Image (tube, helix red, strand yellow):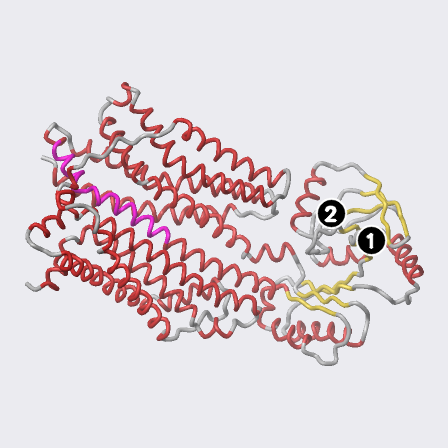
């Protein structure tokens, strides 16, 4: 047997430990290849039809940044996992030195072992990526709302980038592995497994501080929502929660276990002595890993759930219910021609529509004043209830966006009392009485602008006085909005891009005008959020996989010690059901405590977010929780089965 065969046999013989390392490396290669597949995709490089240049730039730069993030974290993960393997093999390396292996030969052995796993992971990762490439493109095409999905192409550049990047990564990691073994004498290596672990200790003050910090951070988040929109307050609250989470795992968890151990009635009941004693060491050893899993998972849950909610078509139609919006500053032949082109396009495509318009007056604070008849015409077209005003000086407020709609709905539900206010337009001042506000968005406004609906007579009076004041023509207006209501506005996607482009590129158009299509606004938002979802989702899955692998490493790093421990206890009468009970309770806490805390953090974030918006994000959040929890349960059952199988073999 030559040296190369010896290195390969070492990997094969330690397949139980190397398996998680190989699978996680393969998965990271596959995800890196997936990003490269999208990075070099011709449709995304050239820009999706109907999307803005911002979306294209976000896609190209986002996938490139994701590649860098995956590469960096893969490097750190591989260093961690290699370090974990070397710690479990110290005794083996000591024996190699006793029988005459030189330091140079040991470094060569480690290099060959790591490159063997690395090359296998690269081949497997790229191969799986190619096998699932079409499915990946179909899913990403759906997330980006691409018609007919993203077309398949053979990704030569993606393969070359993936192979080159990870080949370099594995070479660097393989060379670095020898540096991790330079500490420790021969005696230390041989007797590494015999050194006892010190008993975990925790500070009562720091344990209490963890609870205070997390509670204070939660309070700060709700203070941001209910009291003051101060982003330094929000950022500080998040940092406080993160620090509290770290102390919770490093101090509070150990302190609670020590407190439970001091209760003799509980500690000496059945198998609690073994369970609590072993759990204290596991919590202390894995505290940093649990902290990272909780913070990353909470960020992923919150980000992905919010992006899914924002990309919902229903949200776009709630904020702006009009399929097409044409805005112009004054009447001109080009204005009439553009509006006629929109109508002819809708008729040619057999799309039923209703048209309405309004000319807002602007008060001295920039708020809208709308004529009642124009408001009612649009409200009727949208299927909302028309309003009436009993007196000439009556008025009501109408929501311009989702935030103001939520506030006005609360007022309407409380039966808000009538209130007198003054509206100033230039030097013209009119006192109006506000009645019950509207609760449907009929006049959409992006900014924090109030919308007041007044009677036709009052509107005409104020408009005429303002024109006289500025000596304007009778037909003058600052702004006119022409709206088109289409029930199936999603169906306008097939012709909306060409229509918008035709009007914008018409060289005969003169003067200020803008035109927008709801389907294109939704598509742009959908694609932007879709790209963010792809980026955050896949990176989140990679982090989740790495975290699961860390747990696997920690379990199997101590496997030989655990086997010996349970073998000795088995001689004293420990049965299989008792062993299963101990192991299951320990693994449940190790696997699900970080995820449970992440869900709590995310739930607080979503409850606070729900106070700011008028659409539900909880449904999407529950789906995210369910997906990640299901993955964690499956991994838990697999690891538990393999771990117990090894333990059962050692019981007498």
Residue 299 part of the magenta-drawn span: no
For residue 277, side relative to residue 40 (left or right): left
Q: Which residue is mark 1?
A: 363
**In this rendering, which labeled residue sits more in front, label 2 or label 1?**
1
Please identify the dominant SS of the magenta region.
Answer: helix
The quadrant in which the N terminus is found is bottom left
Label total for image: 2
Q: Secondary structure at mark 1?
A: loop
Dividing the picture into quadrants, the one containing residue 584 is top left
Q: Is residue 336 above or below residue 232?
A: below
Seen at 79% across and 63% down, the residue is: 479
For residue 503, side relative to residue 458 (left or right): left
Seen at 68% across and 43% down, the residue is: 407
Q: Secondary structure at mark 2?
A: loop
For residue 446, side relative to residue 367 (left or right): left
In-front residue for pair 147/166: 166
Q: Is residue 478 above or below residue 186?
A: below
Mark 2–mark 1 distance (CA, rounded to whole Å): 20 Å
In-front residue for pair 71/308: 71
Q: Is residue 226 above or below residue 405?
A: above
The label number, if any, that marks residue 438 in the structure image: 2
Residue 83 placement (x, y as % from top left): 25, 50
Residue 13 placement (x, y as % from top left): 13, 54
Graded by Cα atoms within 10 Å as few (under 14), some (14 to 19) or many (20 or more), the crowding at tag 2 reads: many
- The residue sitting at the bottom extreme is 507
Residue 383 placement (x, y as % from top left): 69, 55
For residue 110, side relative to residue 257 (left or right): left
What span is colored magenta in the figure?
Answer: 543-568
């Amino acid at each position: 047997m030559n040296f190369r065969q010896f290195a390969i046999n070492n990997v094969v013989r330690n397949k139980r430990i190397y398996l998680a390392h190989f699978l996680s490396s393969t998965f990271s290669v596959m995800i890196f290849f997936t990003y490269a597949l999208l990075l070099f995709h011709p449709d995304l490089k050239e820009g999706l039809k109907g999307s803005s240049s911002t979306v294209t730039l976000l896609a190209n730069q986002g996938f490139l940044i994701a590649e860098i993030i995956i590469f960096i974290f893969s490097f750190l993960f591989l260093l961690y996992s290699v370090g974990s393997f070397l710690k479990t093999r110290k005794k083996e390396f000591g024996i190699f030195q006793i029988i005459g292996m030189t330091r140079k030969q040991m470094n060569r052995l480690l290099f060959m072992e790591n490159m063997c796993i690395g090359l296998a992971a690269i081949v497997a990762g790229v191969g799986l990526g190619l096998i699932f490439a079409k499915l990946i493109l179909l899913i990403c095409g759906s997330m980006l709302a691409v018609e007919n999905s993203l077309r398949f192409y053979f990704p030569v550049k993606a393969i070359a980038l993936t192979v080159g990047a990870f080949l370099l990564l594995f070479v660097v990691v393989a060379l670095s592995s020898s540096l991790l073994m330079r500490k420790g004498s021969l005696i230390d290596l041989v007797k590494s497994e015999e050194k006892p672990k010190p008993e975990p200790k925790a500070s009562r003050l720091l344990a209490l501080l963890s609870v205070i910090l997390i509670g204070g951070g939660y309070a700060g988040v709700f203070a941001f929502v209910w009291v003051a929109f101060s982003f330094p307050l929000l950022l500080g609250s998040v940092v406080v929660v993160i620090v509290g989470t770290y102390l919770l795992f490093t101090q509070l968890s150990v302190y609670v276990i020590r407190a439970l151990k001091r209760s003799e009635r509980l500690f000496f009941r059945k198998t609690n002595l073994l369970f609590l004693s072993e759990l204290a060491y596991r919590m202390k050893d894995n505290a940093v890993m649990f902290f990272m899993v909780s913070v990353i998972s909470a960020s992923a849950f919150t980000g992905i759930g919010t992006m899914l909610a924002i990309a919902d078509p229903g949200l776009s139609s709630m904020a702006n219910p009009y399929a097409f919006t044409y805005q112009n500053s004054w009447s001109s032949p080009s204005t009439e021609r553009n509006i006629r082109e929109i109508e002819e396009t809708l008729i040619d495509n057999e799309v039923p529509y209703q048209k309405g318009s309004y000319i807002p007056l602007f008060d001295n604070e920039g708020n809208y004043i709308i004529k009642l008849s124009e408001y009612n015409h649009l409200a009727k077209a949208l299927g909302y209830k028309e309003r009436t005003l009993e007196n000439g000086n009556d008025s009501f407020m109408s929501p311009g966006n989702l935030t103001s709609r939520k506030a006005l709905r609360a007022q309407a539900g409380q039966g808000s009392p009538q209130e007198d206010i003054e509206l100033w337009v230039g030097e013209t001042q009119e006192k109006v009485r506000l009645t019950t506000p509207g609760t449907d968005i009929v006049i959409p406004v992006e900014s924090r602008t109030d919308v007041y609906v007044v009677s036709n007579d009052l509107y005409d009076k104020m408009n005429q006085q303002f024109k006289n004041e500025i000596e304007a023509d009778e037909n003058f207006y600052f702004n006119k909005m022409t709206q088109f209501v289409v029930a199936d506005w999603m169906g306008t996607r097939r012709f909306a891009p060409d229509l918008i482009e035709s009007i914008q590129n018409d060289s005969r158009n003169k003067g200020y005008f803008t035109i927008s299509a709801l389907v294109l606004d939704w598509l742009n938002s959908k694609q932007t959020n879709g790209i963010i979802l792809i980026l955050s989702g896949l990176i989140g899955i990679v982090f989740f996989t790495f975290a699961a692998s860390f747990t696997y490493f920690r379990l199997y790093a101590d496997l030989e010690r655990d086997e010996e421990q349970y073998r000795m206890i088995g001689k004293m009468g420990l049965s299989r059901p008792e062993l299963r009970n101990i192991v299951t309770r320990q693994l449940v806490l190790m696997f699900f405590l970080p995820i449970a805390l992440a869900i709590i953090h995310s739930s607080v974030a979503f409850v606070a977010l729900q106070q700011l918006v008028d659409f539900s994000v909880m449904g999407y959040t529950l789906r995210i929780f369910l997906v990640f929890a299901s993955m964690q349960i499956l991994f838990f059952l697999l690891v538990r089965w393999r771990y117990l199988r090894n333990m059962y073999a050692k019981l007498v």
